[in-house]
């Protein structure tokens, strides 16, 4: 709820194993308490399609963020369940813009590549690698963002959106003041870009 109160447009409910994982009962409570204008995003890693369908139905998810090795056919199958699909892409070098644009998704979430992690590394990647893709399709910038650097990320990439986790945590817990600062910095950077490009 603190993310919504801070002004976030979307809230991620992480169903993948890890320290941020929420169980189904808690996800339902969070989802039911969110204002109707906040997008509920289920974050999954290599889940069977039937499990994703059950999560969508049970939590009334608006979107599903795929953080595993899901292929185009799987992305299409999730999209056919009636939700927005966001596919995570791990950035370790130049991106194949044509291949990525062909994926049947609403947006790509670009995150820092770490062989042993599926997000939450707290490290940024070379943002210049993301700009060509962001010019061609909706991109959500992720990976090491914080209230201190999100404005620079928005200016460098011009993403559709930004995603944060560890950058607004203190001792592994989301901090409301950091969340407010992050949202304010991201919105201010976006407003500056909008004004410059009028």
Image (tube, rainbow, N blue to C red):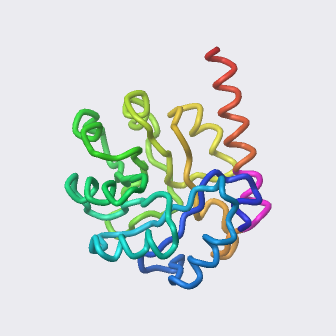
Q: Quadrant of the C terminus?
A: top right
Question: Which of the pair 44/192 is nearer the observer?
Answer: 44
Question: Which of the pair 50/89 is nearer the observer?
Answer: 50
Residue at 24% x, 39% y is: 102
- Residue 17's quadrant in the figure? bottom left
Q: Which residues are magenta?
A: 175-182
Is 12 placed above or below 126 here? Answer: below
Q: Quadrant of the N terminus?
A: bottom right
Q: Position of residue 50 (x, y in %)?
A: 29, 75
Looking at this rendering, what residue extends furthest in the top direction? Answer: 198
Q: Position of residue 144 (x, y in %)?
A: 54, 55
Q: Position of residue 32 (x, y in %)?
A: 64, 72
Residue 73: say if magenta: no
Residue 179: say if magenta: yes
* Most frequent secondary structure within the magenta stretch: helix
Question: Which of the pair 77/160 is nearer the observer?
Answer: 77
Question: Which of the pair 10/59 is nearer the observer?
Answer: 59
- Residue 83's quadrant in the figure? bottom left
Residue at 66% x, 17% y is: 196
Q: Position of residue 116 (x, y in %)?
A: 34, 70
Residue at 56% x, 47% y is: 162
Say whether residue 15 is left or right of residue 9. Answer: left
Say whether residue 149 is left or right of residue 44. Answer: right
Say whether residue 91 is left or right of residue 18. Answer: left
Residue at 66% x, 67% y is: 169
Say whether residue 11 is left or right of residue 35. Answer: left
Is 77 placed above or below 52 here? Answer: above
Is 75 placed above or below 46 here? Answer: above
């Amino acid at each position: 709820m603190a993310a919504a109160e801070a002004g976030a447009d979307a809230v991620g409910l992480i169903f993948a194993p890890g320290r941020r994982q929420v169980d189904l009962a808690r996800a339902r409570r969070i989802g039911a308490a969110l204002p109707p204008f906040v997008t509920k995003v289920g974050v999954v890693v290599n889940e069977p399609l039937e499990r994703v369908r059950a999560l969508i139905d049970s939590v009334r998810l608006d979107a599903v963020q795929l953080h595993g090795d899901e292929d185009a056919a799987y992305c299409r199958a999730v999209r056919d369940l009636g939700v927005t699909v966001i596919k995570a892409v791990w950035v370790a070098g130049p991106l194949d813009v044509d291949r990525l644009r062909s994926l049947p998704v609403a947006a790509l979430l670009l995150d820092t590549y770490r062989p042993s992690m599926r997000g939450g590394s707290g490290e940024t990647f070379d943002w210049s690698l993301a700009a060509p893709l962001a010019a061609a399709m909706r991109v959500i910038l992720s990976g090491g963002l914080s209230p201190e650097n999100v404005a620079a990320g928005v200016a460098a990439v011009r993403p559709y959106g930004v995603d944060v986790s560890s950058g607004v945590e203190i001792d592994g817990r989301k901090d409301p003041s950091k969340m407010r600062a992050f949202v304010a910095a991201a919105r201010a950077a976006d407003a500056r870009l909008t004004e410059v490009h009028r």
